[in-house]
Image (cartoon, rainbow, N blue to C red):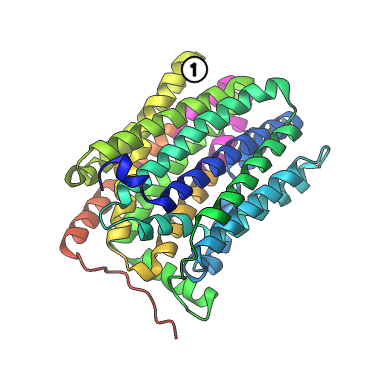
C-alpha cells in the first residue's frame, strides 16, 4: 500500500483519521487556552508549561499499572473512553473562575484514561492495514496531528482575540463530542488482542520485558529524550511570544507535517531507518540559535525547520511494531507514547525552571530555549551507539524478541 487512494480506501482508517483530526484540534485549542489562563493568573513559566504539557507525568505513573488495558479492551471501547474523558474535562475547564488547583485536578482526568488506553489507536492502525503499511498509515495520521495542530493553535490564537478562554474550552469540548460520535458510527467491534485476567500484573510484566530488551530499550530512549527536551523548548513559546505564541506552535506543527509527509510517503523503507540520527540532530540544532534572541519571523523559520526532525519517530515506531508480538502491540505502542509524553512534561518543567532562574521574561525564555536545545543535541549524540546496536539486533532477530506473557 503506497498511495493515499489505497490508504483512504480502508473505511475504518478514514474514521481513525477523522477522529485524530478532531482530537488534535481539541487538544491544541484546549492546551493553548489552559496555558494562557495559567500564565495570566500566575506569571509563572513553570506552571504555564506544566498546564500545557504536564499531564503525561501522571499518565506515566498510572500506565505502569493500567497500560495493558490497551490490549484487553475492545479498540472501539478504548477510543470512546478517550474522546469522552477529554470532552468532559474541557467542559469542566470552561467553568469561569476555577482556582488553579481545580484546573490541574481536571487536567488529570483524561490523562488517567489515556494511561489505560493510550496504545489503542496506534495498534488499531497496525491491525486494520496490510502488513508493511504501518509506517505509511502512521505517517498519514501524523499529518492529521501536525495539520490540526497548525489549525488548532492558529485558530486558537485568532479566537483569543474574539473569545475568552472559557469559550475556547467549549470549542475544544465540541470537537471531542464530534470525535465521540465518529467513533460510535465508524469503528467496528474488533475483539481485544488479549484475554489476560489481571490488567495490573500483565502491564508490569510486559513493561519490564520491554524496558530490559537491548533491542527495544534504545528505541524508546531515542524517541523519548530528544523529543521531550525539544518540546521543553516549545513550552516556552507563551512567555517568549505572548499573544503571538500560537503562530510559533503552528510553525512547528507545520514542520512536523512536512517531515512526516516526506519520510512516510516518499522515502524508501530501506533508507528510513538510517535517517533516525540525522533527523534527531536536525530536531535540536536550530534551537541553539535562540541564544541570539531572534525576532519572531526568524523564530518561526527555526521552529519550522527543527520540527521536520520529528519524523525520526516513524522508523523508530516501525522497528517496535516489527520486533514485538501482535498480542502486546497496544501496550508496546502505548508505552512508547506514554514515555514520549512524560519526557515532554519533564522537558517543559526543566525549561520552565531554567527560564525562571534567569529572572523570567522574554530574554530569559529565549536563553532557556537555546540551552535546552543544546541538551537535546548532546543527548542525541550519547544515544547513537545504543541505537546502532539495536538496529543490528533488529536485522539479526527478525522473529519477535519480545513476547507476550502467559495469560493464565
Q: Which of 395/188 is in front? A: 188
Q: Establish if 23 lies above or below 114.
A: above
81 vs 95, left or right, is left
Check residue 266 for magenta coloring. no
In depth, the one of 38 and 260 nearer the eye is 260
Q: Main secondary structure of the magenta part?
A: helix
Tag 1 residue: 293
Q: Position of residue 72 (x, y in %)?
A: 50, 71
Which residue is found at the position 39% from the left and 55% from the top?
125
Image check: 241 left or right of 196?
right
Residue 92 visible, this angle: yes
* In this picture, residue 268 sits left or right of residue 63: left
Q: Nearer the viewer, residue 131 or 292?
A: 131
Q: Secondary structure at mark 1?
A: loop
Quadrant holding the C terminus: bottom left
Is 51 left or right of 340, judged from the image as shown? right
Q: Which span is picked out in magenta? A: 347-372
Indicate the position of residue 103 as horizontal and vertical percent values: 74, 45
Amino acid at each position: 500500500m503506497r498511495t493515499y487512494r489505497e490508504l483512504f480506501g480502508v473505511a475504518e482508517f478514514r474514521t481513525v483519521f477523522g477522529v485524530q483530526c478532531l482530537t488534535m484540534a481539541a487538544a491544541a485549542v484546549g492546551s493553548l487556552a489552559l496555558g494562557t489562563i495559567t500564565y495570566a493568573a500566575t506569571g509563572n513559566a513553570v506552571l504555564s508549561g506544566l498546564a500545557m504539557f504536564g499531564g503525561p507525568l501522571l499518565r506515566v505513573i498510572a500506565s505502569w499499572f493500567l497500560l495493558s488495558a490497551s490490549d484487553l479492551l475492545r479498540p472501539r471501547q478504548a477510543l470512546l473512553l478517550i474522546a469522552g474523558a477529554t470532552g468532559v474535562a474541557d467542559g469542566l475547564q470552561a467553568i469561569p473562575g476555577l482556582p488553579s488547583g481545580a484546573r490541574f485536578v481536571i487536567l488529570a482526568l483524561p490523562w488517567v484514561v489515556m494511561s489505560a488506553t493510550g496504545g489503542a489507536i496506534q495498534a488499531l492502525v497496525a491491525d486494520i492495514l496490510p502488513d508493511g503499511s504501518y509506517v505509511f498509515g502512521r505517517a498519514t495520521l501524523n499529518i492529521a496531528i501536525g495539520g490540526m495542530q497548525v489549525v488548532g493553535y492558529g485558530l486558537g490564537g485568532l479566537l483569543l482575540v474574539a473569545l475568552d478562554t472559557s469559550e475556547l474550552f467549549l470549542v475544544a469540548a465540541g470537537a471531542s463530542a464530534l470525535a465521540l460520535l465518529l467513533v460510535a458510527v465508524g469503528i467496528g467491534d474488533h475483539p481485544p488482542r488479549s484475554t489476560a485476567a489481571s490488567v495490573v500484573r500483565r502491564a508490569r510484566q510486559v513493561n519490564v520485558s520491554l524496558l530490559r530488551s537491548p533491542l527495544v530499550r534504545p528505541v524508546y530512549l531515542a524517541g523519548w529524550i530528544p523529543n521531550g527536551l525539544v518540546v521543553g523548548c516549545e513550552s516556552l513559546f507563551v512567555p517568549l511570544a505572548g499573544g503571538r505564541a500560537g503562530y510559533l506552535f503552528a510553525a512547528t506543527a507545520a514542520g512536523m507535517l512536512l517531515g512526516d509527509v516526506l519520510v512516510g510517503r516518499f522515502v524508501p523503507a530501506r533508507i528510513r531507518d538510517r535517517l533516525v540520527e540525522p533527523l534527531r540532530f536536525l530536531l535540536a540544532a536550530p534551537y541553539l540559535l535562540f541564544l541570539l534572541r531572534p525576532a519572531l519571523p526568524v523564530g518561526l523559520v527555526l521552529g519550522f525547520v527543527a520540527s521536520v526532525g520529528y519524523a525520526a519517530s516513524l522508523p523508530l515506531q516501525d522497528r517496535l511494531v516489527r520486533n514485538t508480538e501482535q498480542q502486546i502491540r497496544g501496550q508496546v505502542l502505548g508505552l512508547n507514547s506514554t514515555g514520549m509524553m512524560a519526557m515532554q512534561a519533564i522537558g517543559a518543567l526543566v525549561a520552565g525552571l531554567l527560564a525562571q532562574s534567569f529572572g523570567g521574561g522574554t530574554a530569559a525564555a529565549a536563553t532557556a530555549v537555546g540551552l535546552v536545545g543544546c541538551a537535546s543535541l548532546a543527548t542525541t549524540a550519547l544515544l547513537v551507539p545504543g541505537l546502532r546496536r539495536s538496529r543490528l539486533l533488529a536485522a539479526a532477530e527478525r522473529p519477535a524478541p519480545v513476547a507476550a506473557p502467559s495469560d493464565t
